[in-house]
Image (cartoon, rainbow, N blue to C red):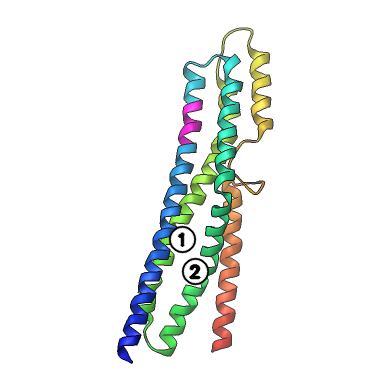
Amino acid sequence: SIWQDVRCDNGYGVAQSLCCGIILSLSFAMACLCRSLNAMIDSFCCDSVDRLPISDIAHVWNLTQALVRRCSEAIEHCFLVLIAAVSVSLPLTFVGIVWSEQAEGEGYQAAVAGLPPFFIACGILDVVVSAAKVSEKCARVPALINAIGFGPGTERARQHLVDYITSSAAGFYVYGMRVTTAVVCRVAYVWTVVGIGVCTRILAVEA
């Protein structure tokens, strides 16, 4: 009956809103964590320039990179699951919008229903970009340390420190893979090509 259809629609809307709220909350929390890691690396760089002696920089860097690595390990499962969920939901949402337009002429309603996955994708994109910034900032630390003058007679110690920070390869890691801007661009390019190919194939079969 019509009341059963209304109850089903309301139940679907509530479930969708709840799921989207949970995913957006997770994305917001992960983005805040990545921004905190970025701020921590900035603080280390400022302290290195202003007040830290060269003998203490290695110890402080050890603490900084250990905390970055531990935080990335703590959220790597959620990080990968959210990316996988968006990678699957966006192409399916696009296909659903096209199907609704072709079958029932309800493309506008389907487009409105597809807004939550779009907002989720924007939130997760923010998380990925913030995580890549962590790795990029860590990669620029050796150049900063090499440009600081710690006084006469410290050139050899500074070079050892630069080599040590470079060899530490600190950054945001997900299952052993360092998340950088280059990696994000490659993954986005491959996902876009695959998503367009899948959507085109599905629509061609249905046509």
The stretch in magenta equals: 38-44
Q: Which mark is residue 121?
A: 1
Residue 14 is situated, as x and y percent measured from the top left of the image, at 36, 70
Q: Secondary structure at mark 1?
A: helix
Q: Which part of the image, by quadrant, shows the C terminus? A: bottom right
Of all residues, the one furthest to the bottom in this rendering is 1
Q: Counting residues from the N terminus, which is met first, the one under dot 2 or under dot 1?
A: 2
- 10 Å neighbourhood of mark 1: few (<14), some, or many (≥20)? many
Residue 22 falls in image quadrant: bottom left
Of all residues, the one furthest to the top in this rendering is 152
Magenta: main secondary structure = helix
Q: Residue at x 56, y 78 (%)?
A: 200
Q: Residue at x 52, y 71 (%)?
A: 91
Residue 134 is situated, as x and y percent measured from the top left of the image, at 53, 40
Asked whether, in this view, residue 34 is left or right of residue 143, the answer is left
Q: Residue at x 55, y 88 (%)?
A: 206
Which residue position is annotated with label 2? 90
In the rendered structure, does residue 187 fall within the stretch colored magenta? no
Q: Secondary structure at mark 2?
A: helix
Which amino acid lies under the numbered mark 1 shown in the image of this protein?
A: Ala
Q: CA distance from mark 2 to mark 1?
A: 8 Å
Q: Dots 2 and 1: beta carbons under 8 Å?
A: yes
Q: Which mark is residue 97?
A: none
Residue 88 falls in image quadrant: bottom right
Residue 192 is situated, as x and y percent measured from the top left of the image, at 56, 65
The answer to whether residue 126 is visible is yes
Q: How many dots with numbers?
A: 2
Q: Which part of the image, by quadrant, shows the N terminus? A: bottom left
User: In the figure, 121 relative to 30: above or below?
Assistant: below
Which amino acid lies under the numbered mark 2 shown in the image of this protein?
A: Leu
Residue 199 falls in image quadrant: bottom right
